[in-house]
Amino acid sequence: SYSRISFKDVAKRLALDSPESAELICAKAVRDGVIDATISHEKGQLVSSEVLDIYSTIEPQQAFHKRIQFCLSMHNDAVKAMRYPPDAHKAKHDLVADEEKKTEEEIAKEIEEELEEDEE
């Protein structure tokens, strides 16, 4: 990485028309926080700030915690979406049991009728 780079070199590497275009793009990147640097208009350079040891701060831990919280939230929402209302299966089970009972009663009636016909 560079600690300083001229706008002429930036324009060349990015295939821009002029160093002024590179300066505008760099200024926007610095303003938006994409690049941690300052612009030296007098020298026509972009001067990067000193690189800090990011791992000596708690920032990586906070980012990791935020990602874990998102994943856990997504998991909990999915589990909630898969839950059934209490006793939702009982109504269906009762209907199936009633149908089976009716079927058994109908079979019993048919057998009785056949037996009665055979006796006559």
Image (cartoon, grey):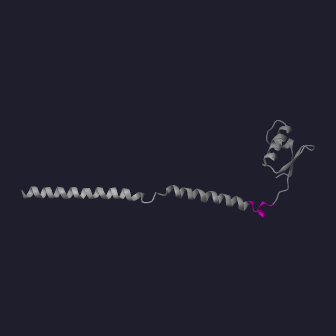
Q: Quadrant of the C terminus?
A: bottom left
Q: In the displayed structure, does residue 85 sit left or right of residue 95?
A: right
- Single out the residue that lies furthest toward the bottom: 56
Residue 79 position (above or below residue 5): below
Which percent across, then down, holds residue 2? Answer: 84, 51
Q: Which quarter of the figure has residue 108?
A: bottom left
40 vs 89, nearest the viewer: 89
Which percent across, then down, holds residue 111? Answer: 16, 58
Q: In the displayed structure, does residue 114 sit left or right of residue 3?
A: left
Which percent across, then down, holds residue 93? Answer: 36, 58
* Magenta residues (range): 53-59
Q: In the displayed structure, does residue 70 sit left or right of residue 9?
A: left
**What residue do we see at 85% from left, 43% from top?**
9
**What residue do we see at 82% from left, 47% from top?**
30
**What residue do we see at 67% from left, 58% from top?**
66
24 vs 86, nearest the viewer: 86
Figure disc tally: 0
Which percent across, then down, holds residue 32? Answer: 78, 46
**What residue do we see at 21% from left, 55% from top?**
106
32 vs 55, nearest the viewer: 32
Q: In the displayed structure, does residue 79 sit left or right of residue 29?
A: left
- Single out the residue that lies furthest toward the left: 120
Q: Which quarter of the figure has residue 113?
A: bottom left
50 vs 80, nearest the viewer: 80
Q: Is residue 4 magenta?
A: no
- Single out the residue that lies furthest toward the top: 17
